[in-house]
């Protein structure tokens, strides 16, 4: 499912013991379901979602990345009155959400387990995202 509320079904066929698939997606992915009825897959070994950050605009910066306890966001669009910052896991589930109108903002991530996450910033009708890594 995409953040704009639309969705699509993509069928991929396994031809080897391990297959890698790369799909060019032009919309922001909000949720991925893999065979929700368990019709075909007997076991899902590892599915990774990669964000091609070459397509991500530089509307904000995350430092440090990787981060341990705090994620610092630096925004470049100073004309914005309010923005929502959401931390998502790679399946698109929202783990945290905070609002700010500051150009620099810190969000506490100490309670998150180590792993890869997405920082989604919503400002009006615009959404911007970046991937970050949480380490212990």
Image (tube, rainbow, N blue to C red):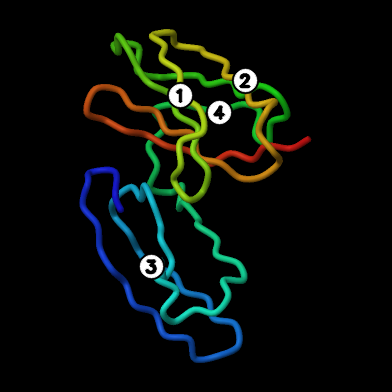
The answer to which of marks 4 and 2 sits earlier in the sequence is 4
Residue 117: x percent and y percent? 56, 41
Residue 120: x percent and y percent? 42, 33
The answer to which of marks 4 and 1 sits earlier in the sequence is 4
Q: Which quarter of the picture shows residue 99? A: top left
> How far apart in space, not on screen, are marks 3 and 1 (Cα)?
29 Å
The answer to which of marks 3 and 4 sits earlier in the sequence is 3
Q: Which quarter of the picture shows residue 59? A: top left
Q: Which residue is the site of mark 1?
A: 97
Classify mark 3: residues with Cα within 10 Å, few (<14), some (14-19) or many (20+). few
Closer to us: mark 4 or mark 1? 1
Q: Which residue is the site of mark 3?
A: 23
Side (left or right) of 48 relative to 35: right
Q: Secondary structure at mark 3?
A: loop
The answer to which of marks 3 and 1 sits earlier in the sequence is 3
> How far apart in space, not on screen, are marks 3 and 4 (Cα)?
26 Å
Q: Which residue is the site of mark 2?
A: 108
Classify mark 1: residues with Cα within 10 Å, few (<14), some (14-19) or many (20+). some
Closer to us: mark 4 or mark 2? 2
> How far apart in space, not on screen, are marks 4 and 2 (Cα)?
13 Å
Q: Which residue is the site of mark 4?
A: 62
């Amino acid at each position: 499912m995409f953040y704009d509320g639309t969705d699509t079904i993509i069928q991929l066929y396994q031809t080897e013991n391990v297959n890698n698939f790369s799909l060019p997606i032009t919309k922001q992915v909000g949720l991925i379901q893999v065979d929700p009825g368990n019709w075909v897959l007997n076991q899902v070994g590892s599915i990774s979602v990669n964000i091609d950050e070459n397509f991500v605009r530089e509307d904000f910066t995350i430092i440090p990345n990787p981060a341990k306890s705090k994620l610092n966001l630096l925004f470049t669009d100073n004309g914005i009155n309010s923005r929502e910052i959401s931390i998502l896991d790679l399946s698109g589930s929202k783990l945290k959400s905070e609002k700010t109108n500051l150009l620099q903002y810190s969000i506490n991530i100490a309670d998150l387990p180590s792993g890869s996450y997405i920082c989604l910033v919503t400002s009006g009708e615009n959404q911007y995202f970046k991937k970050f890594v949480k380490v212990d």
